[in-house]
Image (spheres, grey):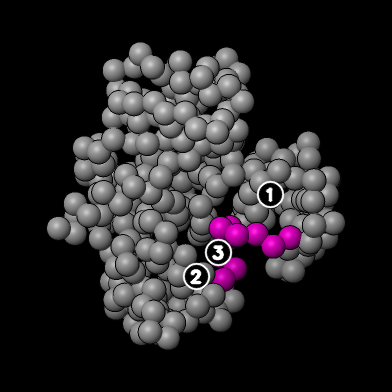
């Protein structure tokens, strides 16, 4: 390893499936701390994550985590906590049982597995529901339990694939705080997303992938400056979309508002201020929000800017 604070290195790393190249000739180093992995759908984020966690073998090139290849390497794999984007649960299990059994499979004693499961569920805000069957969980609760099982193993390298998916605004705020706290504890965290705002809340270090290649790697400020040149379209689902829109109609950064089937689409030139205000409104005044979506178009515009 070239430096003590570098935890992951790749050299000419490639992965293809038949004629489809998912990761193409990546040569990079990730340092200790929180790194945001950004890219639109199909950019190669999930394939790169599976190479990092040893789930895939490279088609060409090398990857080393803590100085060694992760594939079939139990010493390295025991240092990884992984929260995948998709989930497959035993639906009749409780969230606590799911986390506890994974700890047991990892090799913990019953006593240690129980303790770790309780602590992990508490850390993701699931203590009150951890003894309920997973089949009764909302999408956000399922996401929290996935993160809990990754944290329960006390990993040195935590990989979170789209961890904000399915969380309500309050849950997102809690997850931002959790990831930030993990970074301050000295853990190394790789967080993937296709929304730059989410990454900006937890780290200043970004790895941008496009068509399996590195488009940019470094400070988020440069990417933020580029993306701020383009308006952001945010779709909000609510039982009272007009009340939601009324909170933003007079903002100088609001460029347009549209209504459609219980949704309101707000275009803003200042996404940071917009999301902060929206979160404050939900937490302070109980503004009814069912879901928030930010299209890939804004991030895609940055890719196009960098490519041309």
Residue bearing mark 3: 80
| Relative depth, front residue between 302 and 145 | 302
Are discs 1 and 3 less than 8 Å apart at CB? no
Residue 203: x percent and y percent? Answer: 38, 44
Q: Nearer the viewer, mark 3 or mark 2?
A: 2
Which region shows up in magenta?
76-89
* Marking on residue 142: 1
Reading the chain from its start, which is encountered first: label 1 or label 3? 3
- The residue to which callout 2 is attached is 50
Residue 24 % position (x, y)? 31, 75
Whether 94 is among the magenta residues is no
Left or right: 15, with 134 as reference point: left
Please name the residue shown 74% across and 69% down the image.
105
At mark 3, the secondary structure is: strand
Left or right of residue 230: residue 189: right
Question: CA gap, disc 1 to disc 3?
Answer: 20 Å
Task: Tell me the CA gap for discs 2 and 1.
Answer: 21 Å
Label 2 element class? helix
Query: Is residue 221 in sight in this rendering?
Result: no
């Amino acid at each position: 390893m070239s430096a003590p604070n570098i935890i992951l290195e790749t050299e000419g790393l490639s992965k293809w499936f038949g004629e489809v190249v998912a990761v193409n000739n990546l040569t990079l180093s990730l340092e200790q701390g929180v790194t945001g992995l950004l890219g639109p759908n199909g950019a190669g984020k999930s394939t790169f994550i599976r190479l990092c966690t040893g789930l895939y073998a490279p088609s060409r090139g090398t990857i080393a985590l803590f100085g060694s290849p992760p594939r079939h390497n139990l010493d390295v794999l025991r240092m990884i906590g992984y929260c995948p984007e998709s989930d497959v649960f035993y639906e009749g299990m409780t969230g606590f049982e799911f986390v506890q059994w994974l700890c047991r499979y990892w090799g913990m004693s019953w006593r240690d597995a129980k303790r770790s499961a309780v602590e992990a569920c508490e850390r993701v805000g699931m203590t009150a529901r951890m003894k309920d069957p997973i089949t009764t969980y909302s999408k956000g609760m399922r996401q929290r339990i996935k993160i809990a099982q990754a944290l329960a193993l006390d990993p040195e390298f935590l990989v979170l694939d789209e961890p904000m998916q399915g969380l309500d605004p309050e849950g997102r705020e809690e997850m931002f705080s959790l990831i930030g706290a993990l970074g301050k504890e000295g853990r190394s965290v790789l967080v993937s997303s296709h929304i730059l705002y989410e990454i900006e809340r937890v780290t200043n270090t970004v790895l941008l992938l496009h068509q399996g290649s590195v488009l940019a790697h470094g400070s988020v400020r440069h990417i933020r400056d580029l993306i701020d040149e383009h308006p952001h379209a945010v779709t909000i689902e609510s039982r009272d979309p007009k009340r939601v829109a009324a909170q933003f109609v007079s903002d100088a950064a609001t460029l347009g508002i549209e209504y459609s089937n219980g949704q309101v689409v707000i275009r803003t030139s200042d996404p940071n201020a917009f999301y902060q205000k929206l979160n404050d409104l939900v937490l302070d005044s109980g503004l009814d929000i069912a879901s928030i979506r930010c299209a890939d178009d804004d991030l895609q515009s940055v890719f196009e800017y960098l490519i041309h």
